Amino acid sequence: MEVRQMRCFATLAEELHFGRAAATLAMAQPALSVQIQTLERELGVQLLTRSTRRVQLTKAGEVFYERCIRVLRDIENSSAVVRAVAGKDVDRITIGTIYPATFGVLPLFLSKLGKRFPDVQIHISSGSTDAIIRDLEKGRINLGFIRPVENIGSLRWQSIANERYLLAVPLGSPLEMAETVTLSDLKRERIISFSRSNLSYTEKYFFEQFRKHGLLDQVAYSCDDTLSLVSLVAAGIGVGFVPEWTKDLPHRSFRLREVEGVDFTIGMGLAWNKEDPTANREEFVEIGRSLTSVWRPRQPSGGHSERTGKKRHRSAHGE
């Protein structure tokens, strides 16, 4: 049995599609099939069931997949340990990030990282909090910008920012012109929310908050991401809660307003695997921790967020 065969099988077990797995491995699909068939012959068991429509793991395949992940992670960790002992700095780091971080903490983090380690190759991998946690545990990424999690097992999380969400309303709408916006006002509006089908941290958070404030019946539309939500708001379809960084979007046709009695805030932080032996990892984590001095939670001012002549919040971007 070869390491290459194990990598091929592990990738196929995750993709459950020969074409996608072959593309991920940068190899031809027939060559991948040969590797898997050879591996099954050597083991004397069937690892996969194949049909024209899908690929599935057998019970033996599920067990072997878990074993492969452990072995491959140990090999990667051993390489990193040897390099660290030899005084070799890390030459590559993979960072997982949820979508909101790409507009906020990630650019600042990359700027600091690039100045401190100009020779390090950096790869950015986008995904959900749950997917990034899995990749951290499997050693596929070194750091992750994700929503709050508990420090369980080898997983560690450091809070960096509290991202405040305000109500986006169309330009010229009654809510844009109102002196104040209240919960009663919202109960007369069509609310656009994030789709519950994705079951991300943010979507679960807003479902609970809307239920708490009696707004679930007002949710008339849903979408998968922030940019889609603000586009629907700008089109006059409804109103919705979006992070403050959206006020920096160019050519926008919406305003951000505070809602009396409502403070929607979602945490964001840096996660890592404490068993990851990557050289200089602690220095990477410290760079992440240093962002807390720049990204501070905004405090409600009790005024309008973006009305001329009214009170405004300082931007988390330093504006």
Image (tube, grey):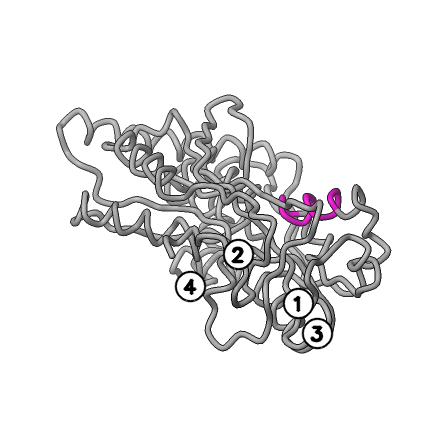
- Mark in front: 3 vs 4: 3
Q: Is residue 307 magenta?
A: no
Label 2 is placed on what type of residue?
A: Lys
Identified at 82% across, 52% down, the residue is: 216
Quadrant of the rendering where the N terminus is positioned: top left
- Callout 3: SS: loop
- Callout 4: SS: loop
Pick the front one: 136 or 52: 136
Mark 1 highlights which residue? Answer: 169
Binning the other alpha carbons within 10 Å of mark 1 as few (below 14), some (14 to 19) or many (20 upward) gives many
- Image location of residue 10, percent across then percent down: 49, 43
- Mark in front: 3 vs 2: 2
Binning the other alpha carbons within 10 Å of mark 2 as few (below 14), some (14 to 19) or many (20 upward) gives few
- Mark in front: 4 vs 2: 2
Q: CA distance from mark 4 to mark 2?
A: 60 Å
Label 4 is placed on what type of residue?
A: Ala
Mark 4 highlights which residue? Answer: 28
Q: Is residue 203 magenta?
A: yes
Closer to the N terminus: mark 4 or mark 2? Answer: 4
Closer to the N terminus: mark 2 or mark 1? Answer: 1
Q: Are marks 2 and 1 in contact (CB under 8 Å)?
A: no
Closer to the N terminus: mark 3 or mark 2? Answer: 3
Closer to the N terminus: mark 3 or mark 4? Answer: 4
Mark 2 highlights which residue? Answer: 311
Which stretch is magenta?
200-209
In the orientation shown, which residue stands out farthest toward the top?
153
- Image location of residue 117, percent across then percent down: 19, 44
Residue 8 relative to residue 299: left or right: left
In the orientation shown, which residue stands out farthest toward the front?
309
Label 3 is placed on what type of residue?
A: Ser
Mark 3 highlights which residue? Answer: 173
Q: CA distance from mark 2 to mark 1?
A: 18 Å
